[in-house]
Amino acid sequence: MPKIVDHDQRRLELVDATWRIIARLGMEGATMREIAEEAGFANGALKPYFPTKDLLLTSAFGHVFNRTNQRIAAMTEGLSGVAALRAFCAEVLPLDEERVNEARIVIPFWQKALNDADMASLHSESMSQWHTTITGHCAAARAAGEIKAPIGDAAVADHLLNMMLGAQIVVALSPAEHFSQDLAGQLDNYLALLAS
């Protein structure tokens, strides 16, 4: 009887291997050969799943974004207002090794997205989704009297997105200089400013 292969599981294994290689060796180290070896595949076995490295990298970014969204959903469940904002941001900020590794994947993806319309579109859709969610949490916080600052909810969402994405760059480039407590404190300070 022929072996039954779960192709979706194989794709996920390859994406996970790509994630680990980029986090460990950077984009340059993420060769198809390295990825195949990390996943326990023969080098040529990747082609049926991901014919090009760019498709594999796009899938790796989508995987990171989906994992982050799953954590956000779990951590914000039952929360609203400022508590939901804090929980959302804490799942994106690079506060632990897993999220630092995610930043190490996102940064090279941004570089590739500069010249690839499909990758740029994926990034734009992802950030639009986050912006909408953050703006909704801001509106709930304002309605509950938790945000009193005279700036609009969309502007607050812009500030928070810029803070989170900027923190990913800074921590990925110089992790020893920017401890997670500093980032959490910066977030708390910003949220406190919104309340005054």
Image (cartoon, rainbow, N blue to C red):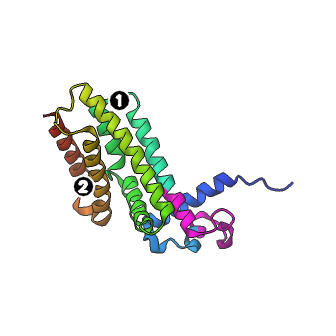
Q: Residue furthest top?
A: 144
Side (left or right) of 8 relative to 113: right
Task: Choose between 18 and 137: the one closer to the eye.
Answer: 137
Say which quarter of the image contains residue 34.
Answer: bottom right
Q: Earlier in the sequence, mark 2 or mark 1?
A: 1
Name the residue: 27% across, 65% down: 174
Secondary structure mostly taken by the magenta-highlighted segment of the chain: helix
Position of residue 190 relative to residue 164, above or below, is: above
Position of residue 43 relative to residue 177, above or below, is: below
Q: Which residue is mark 1?
A: 79
Name the residue: 32% across, 38% down: 135
- Element marked by disc 2: loop
* Residue 116 image position (x, y, % from top left): 48, 66
Name the residue: 40% across, 53% down: 98
Name the residue: 68% across, 68% down: 45
Magenta segment includes 179: no
- Element marked by disc 1: loop
Residue contact between numbered discs 2 and 1, judged by CB atoms under 8 Å: no
Task: Choose between 109 and 24: the one closer to the eye.
Answer: 109
* Residue 152 image position (x, y, % from top left): 23, 39
Amino acid bearing label 1: Leu
Distance from disc 2 to disc 1, alpha carbons, whole Å, reads 26 Å
Task: Choose between 36 and 52: the one closer to the eye.
Answer: 52
Q: Which mark is residue 179?
A: 2
* Residue 187 image position (x, y, % from top left): 23, 45
Q: Which residues are magenta?
A: 36-61
Side (left or right) of 40 relative to 148: right
